[in-house]
Image (cartoon, rainbow, N blue to C red):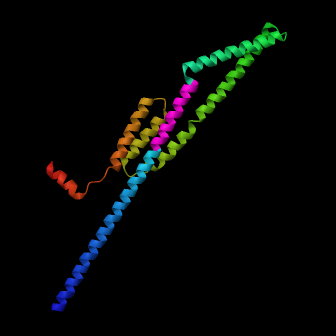
Amino acid sequence: MDKLIDLVSTFASGAVIAVLTVWLTNRSRTRQEQQAEIGALRVQADAMTVAVIEVQGAAVANRLLWEGPAERGRTFLLTLLAFAGGAARARVAGGTDVQSGLVGFGQAAELLSRERVAGKQIVAAVREPLTRAGTAAAPLMRCSDSAVVTATEHLLAALAAVEDTVRLESALEAFGRAVNAATAPRLSWWARRRATRTT
């Protein structure tokens, strides 16, 4: 009888130890997976933030280089000078008033054409940061946290209208809050229980 009791107690203690080992192993694995997911989410969110800032920088550079009043005034002045220079060259070469005017218009049109091509190249430079933003957004759209997915969608929509800086800043702040909430440390069961008891 004593041997049977010893055998049962050994079996019971072995079973308890096995159950505890499996439970602790599963809990540790789950915690490691959560930490890895949080780390990956932080990296993805950082990549998205950097891409948004690059798009903002490219848009600001485009605005400063090609769309400001000083730049438009410079283009207008250069066009007038090209017209006058072309007309003067045609006049010196013995052309009539009409021929001088046509040569002047041709010179002005050539200058405006070059300015337009350069402006389109600068606008095309925004495409690369937009592509990086889309690439950074892809894994965020598959996030298990719905707030992060929603904030990413709003941020991408705001990027489509990059000139609306207030909307873009607001969407970027909401994105940051959603990511911070998703990556905040999880409270243990005991900490949650203590918190509910004190309230």
Relative to 25, say whether 84 is above or below. Answer: above
Image-based side of 126 in relation to 197, left or right: right
- Which quadrant: the N terminus? bottom left
Residue range of the region highlighted in magenta in the rendering? 48-66
Residue at 45% x, 49% y is 44
Occupied quadrant, residue 99: top right
Q: Position of residue 47 (x, y in %)?
A: 47, 45
Q: Position of residue 163 (x, y in %)?
A: 48, 29
Relative to 84, say whether 180 is above or below. Answer: below
Q: Is residue 141 visible?
A: no
Q: Nearer the viewer, residue 148 or 181?
A: 181
Q: Is residue 94 magenta?
A: no
Residue at 40% x, 53% y is 39
Q: How many marks on residues?
A: 0
Image-based side of 111 in relation to 187, left or right: right
Q: Position of residue 97 (x, y in %)?
A: 79, 7
Q: Nearer the viewer, residue 30 or 65?
A: 65
